[in-house]
Image (spheres, rainbow, N blue to C red):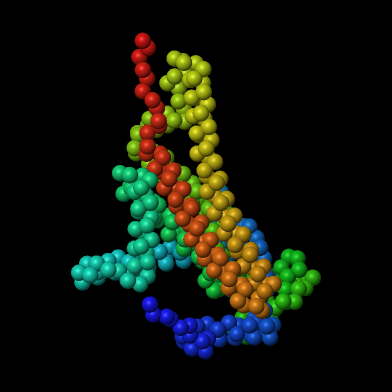
Amino acid sequence: MEQTTKKPFWRWGVNRWIVLALLLAGFFVVGTSTLTTPVRPNILLPAEHLTSQPLFSLPVTGDFYFTNTMVTVLLADVLLIILAFFFNRAIKRAIVDGSLVIKGIPGAVEALLEYLYNMTESTAGKWAKTIFPWFGSITLLVLFANWMELIPGVDSVGLLEKAEHGGYAIQNLGANLATLIRTPVTEGGYELIPFARVVSTDLNFTLALALMAVVAVQIMGIRAHGMSYFSKFFFVKTLFKKPIFGAIDFLVGLLELVSEFSKILSFTFRLFGNIFAGSVILFVMGVLLGKFILVPTIFYMLEFFVGIIQALVFGLLTMTFMAQAVQGHGEAPEKNAA
């Protein structure tokens, strides 16, 4: 067997030296300049308005403003459309060339979609082709939405407005630009309203996605069983024939109905809680350990994997609930009394 010798560190590749140089430059720049010292942004649950006047008003929901989370969801949609375009073009090129091999980013997307489809097929069986588009679309959308927090400028570039309480001092940069500096003030301070904020930290987005997923589950159930699908929620066939067991079946059906509504809360707060907590961690670690630039980078890698896991969990649960909805209700055939 050939024995491999470990190269000394001074014979690293060019890419490793570039990364090391950037880390050292970031350490010195952040540590010596007040303009680049991280300032903790405001941590708010509701999304911030980017328009002073509402775009329109609705009777039930009230005024509708354009928020910074809408910017990121639109950006995620655009990125998905671009990815789909290049993926489709890569497939056509592979067919024309006769190689049937997709390389680069489209190849990674193909591997991910193949993995998702295999999971769908093993769970849903013959319904895989119907359920998979929902599974794949939701997973990719949530994945891109979660990864928005890793893009430079998100949560850090925006409008400076007067803070109601406290805030930070600002330093003018010229050309009508300014930056917050790490000097808290008691009155007359400023706060940052970012142009783009991670959409998964907005309850409106996670709730809307949860409602869509649960409604899609019911649609799949109706498509598979017709209106008899609702009998699992209101089971009254044996209520008068076998009063005791019929009452138990009826109560079990009501519990099934409650569980359907609980799925909305579970979907909503699981995704929101994990991504919102990750954003807070990035804010805090960036402020506390901003000079040690390598440490916040580790938390960015952590959020990278958290974004993948949460997207898979959300999509996988949706697919599993759909597969359960298209299956039979498990009713045993009645036997004639001897």
Q: Is residue 149 above or below residue 172?
A: above
Quarter of the picture holding the C terminus: top left
| Whole-percent x, y for residue 268 in the image | 54, 50
Q: Is residue 165 above or below residue 324?
A: below
Determine the residue positioned at 65% across, 76% down.
Answer: 290
Q: Quadrant of residue 163?
A: bottom right
Res. 161 visible in picture: no
Q: Is residue 320 left or right of residue 61?
A: left
Direction right: furthest residue: 186
Determine the residue positioned at 30% across, 69% down.
Answer: 102
Q: Is residue 73 left or right of residue 160?
A: left
Question: Which one is nearer the viewer's eye here, 335 or 215?
Answer: 335
| Whole-percent x, y for residue 65 in the image | 56, 59
The image shows a total of numbered marks equal to 0
Q: Is residue 296 above or below residue 34?
A: above
Question: Which one is nearer the viewer's eye here, 246 or 81?
Answer: 246
| Whole-percent x, y for residue 212 in the image | 46, 48
Res. 230 visible in picture: yes
Direction front: furthest residue: 1
Determine the residue positioned at 34% across, 67% down.
Answer: 107
Question: Which one is nearer the viewer's eye here, 102 or 1?
Answer: 1
Q: Is residue 313 above or below residue 230?
A: below
Quarter of the picture holding the N terminus: bottom left
| Whole-percent x, y for residue 95 in the image | 22, 67
Determine the residue positioned at 38% across, 45% down.
Answer: 123
